[in-house]
Amino acid sequence: MGPRAKLLLGICALSCVVGWGAYRIEFVQRNSAPAPVSSAQQGPGSTAPIPMHPPAAADDPRVAARLAAVEEDASIRLAVRFDKNRVVFLTSDGDALAVDTKKLRSLGESIAKYGAGSLWEPDDELQAREPKLFSAATVGDQWQLQISGSSQTPVTIRRAVVADPGCDTRVGFLAEVDPAHQTELDSASSPYFLISKDAVSASPGEKLPGIGPLEDWKATPELRLLIGQQLQKEMQTELASIREKAASEYVRSSAVDEAGQSWTEKWEGFDAKLARGEGKLDYDLQAFRLTPDGVPRLHARAKWALDGVTAFLMSAWFRSEPTLALQFSDTSESEHLRYYGFLGDLTNVDAMGTILNVFDPHRDSRGELLIFHQGWGGYDIGLFQYTDAGLTPSAVSFNVGCD
């Protein structure tokens, strides 16, 4: 390989690394929704059903709670299960803590795969050196643990900890569930929760539709066929934009060396085949109740394969009633597939994120999704409010990255 080819290959590899770093911003921008349109604004022909209960009034305290949360949900944090009756949450917001954990007493490892890792007991010297970090919570205080969209329980802060969620060390706290509420924690289907100092409750006597996954919901063969048809149509619509964005990358990759030329020809061929409707479509499907109208929303993670290679990825949300309707989609991972030398793993639908849990933190029957994304050299977990126009990011975000 000549000097020029090596330089071009290096530029391509660097652009891929930078591309992944920018991806999280891109994901938020592509999925962020404008303000939802009310049924009065939708005009004639709207199929929006009458809500199961009237929307919250302007003076409803839940409205103020959501407006405050949109600006800054600083009091709500990700918590993960540590063991049978304790959870752990980190408070240093990604700031690495300079500490030699070999000198600290080990407390064990969290049973949750992500979000905490190994824990240690901080010594007096460390706590004196970082008083601000260790004062984010007070031992003995009671916080609220949101277990799911319909379940929450009080927990008591028991001790400060040092945690290694991956690649760095951070400050956190262990909180314990009261034995009287242990059954609520035992019933949790996910080890990932939200924790906060305060909780918003429903109005007295008000019954809200349970927010969360619909575990018993099953798609009929006819519905799966319709979803497949709409996914295919959406893929071919979005493909034109994907090809346009990939054009400059194809030019760069073909100029690197023979391997780059071969890669470019392969992907240009894939694009042509997809445009003709070729490619084996496979998708998984989950149903959730996320909105005040109670109508199930369906989340599909789809991939199209050609010659055994993943050639297109798309995440899509559908409204299931009164007729199946595609609400919005995200094809950004298909752009990353078309980066020559991209270092991430985009071979299956998990690349588009995994929903870890669903919450209703403001008790307004508007579901918020805790979504995990595996990146190159790290991962992130973020909380997004669902709307029919897209996913709205909150301030609740947990990131781990390795250099």
Image (cartoon, rainbow, N blue to C red):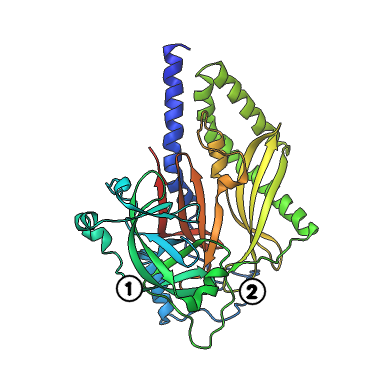
Amino acid at circle 1: Gly
Q: Is residue 365 visible?
A: no
Instruction: Please state which of residues 128 and 50 is positioned toward the viewer in this rendering.
Output: 128
Q: CA distance from mark 2 to mark 1?
A: 47 Å
Q: Is residue 143 above or below residue 376?
A: below
Q: Residue at x 46, y 33 (%)?
A: 16
Q: Relative to 324, is 330 above or below?
A: above
Q: Quadrant of residue 240?
A: top right
> What amino acid is found at the position of numbered circle 2 in the picture?
Pro
Residue in front for this viewpoint, 165 or 320: 165
| SS label for mark 1 | loop
| Spot occupied by residue 332 in the image (x, y as percentages of width and height) | 54, 44
Tell which of 102 and 226 is nearer to you: 102
Residue 325 position in % (x across, y down): 67, 60
Q: Are marks 2 and 1 in contact (CB under 8 Å)?
A: no
| Residue found 48% across the figure and 52% down from its top | 114
- Disc 2: CA contacts within 10 A as few (<14), some (14-19) or many (>=20): few
Residue occupying image coordinates x 55% and y 33%: 338
Q: Does 93 sit left or right of 306 as displayed? A: left
Q: Is residue 73 left or right of residue 242?
A: left
Q: Which mark is residue 140?
A: 1
Looking at the rendered image, the quarter that the C terminus falls into is top left
Between label 2 and label 1, give the one nearer the viewer: 1
Question: Residue 381, image x and y in percent?
Answer: 46, 54
Q: Nearer the viewer, residue 20 or 78?
A: 78
Q: Please give the residue where the numbered disc 2 appears in the rendered image.
A: 49
Q: Earlier in the sequence, mark 2 or mark 1?
A: 2
Pick out the residue farthest to the top.
2
The mark total stands at 2
The image quadrant that residue 313 belongs to is top right
